[in-house]
Amino acid sequence: MPSASSRASRAAALLAIALAAVPAAWAQQGASCEKPVYLTFDTGHMGVAPLVADVLKRQNVRVTFFAAAERTQTDGDSLDSHWAPWWKARAAEGNEFASHTYDHAYWRGDLKGVAPSFRIKPSAGALAGREFTWSAAEYCANISKASERLALITGKKPLPLFRAPGGKTSPRLLAAAKACGFEHVGWSPAGFLGDELPSEKFSNEKLLSQALETIRPGDILLAHLGIWSRKDPWAPANLEPLIVGLKAKGFCFETLRQHPQYRAWIASHP
């Protein structure tokens, strides 16, 4: 595993590369957002959450957070009282929030029958690692539980959106969630920023270069607030260079509240 000093050196080099293209691009930045991208974060071990917040504030970027009660490095979960002030501060900065299911509950398959039901395997909470059969109402309750917890700790109503863990869904699952007021949000192919991938095969330099080359206007970008398995963490090295590099290309950042695919749905579910 690279040392902390070598990681810091590489992060500084990546940021310097991204900054080199900035001056000409700043002149093109106007009040309107003509080339929007939508940066989203799912929860994780939260170890990089303070750094992420610092970068977003410094770069004046607002994002959409999808939250589940996932295990953290602080011996609790990402929606517990320890993290409540962090979430509240993000709300004050104008960020948006949505559910990632409370128990980070993976869809594993549909079951046959007239009433929709699903094989579900939570990866967080007391039931983590076990597979269950949930009705549509039970799945909706788990989406709602995360949304309600976010509302409590942020003081802000979350968006009527959710992201299924791993992006794993079925048409029947999506219909059930929509019937109880939640539209699903995935991510764009180029917007998969790769922080879940093994750093031995996908270096931060490679992921940053790929993102800057392939991201297009309208893309939804996905990163996490900490990935347990990645040895060379993504966010300290890549987050700010990515934002700076995209700004240099004329991109601007909006939350999913402004996304054309979801604006009408959000407006109809105040």
Image (spheres, rainbow, N blue to C red):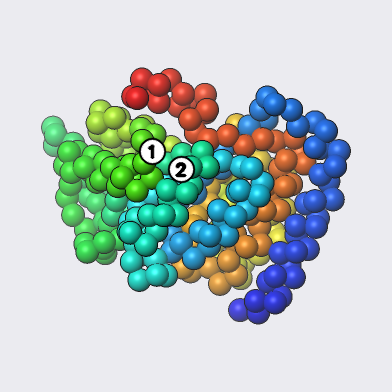
| In-image side of 170 versus 197 (left or right) | left
Residue at the extreme left of the image, as rendered: 114
On screen, 42 above or below 135? below
Q: Amino acid at mark 2?
A: Ala
**In the rendered view of the protein, which quadrant contains the C terminus?**
top left
Vertical side of 253 occupied by 78: above or below: below
Which of the labelled discs sits on residue 156, or is there none? 1
Q: Badge 2: few (under 14), some or many (20 or more) residues near its Cα, within 10 Å? A: many
* Residue 243 picture location, percent across and down: 67, 47
Of helix, strand and loop, which one carries label 2?
helix
Circles 2 and 1, Cβ within 8 Å, touching? The answer is yes
Q: Which residue is rendered at x = 47% and y = 49% of the image?
A: 89
Residue 69 vertical position relative to residue 142 in the rendered view, above or below: below
Residue at 37% in and 62% down: 82
Residue 233 occupies quadrant? bottom right
* Residue at (71, 64) in percent of width and height: 11
> What is the number of the mark on residue 91?
2
Residue 204 x/y as whole percent: 66, 62
Q: Earlier in the sequence, mark 2 or mark 1?
A: 2
For label 1, the crowd category at 10 Å Cα-Cα, with few meaning under 14, some 14 to 19 and many 20 or more, is: some
Q: Name the foreground residue: 29 vs 191.
A: 29
Tag count: 2
Out of 216 and 53, give the one closest to the viewer: 53
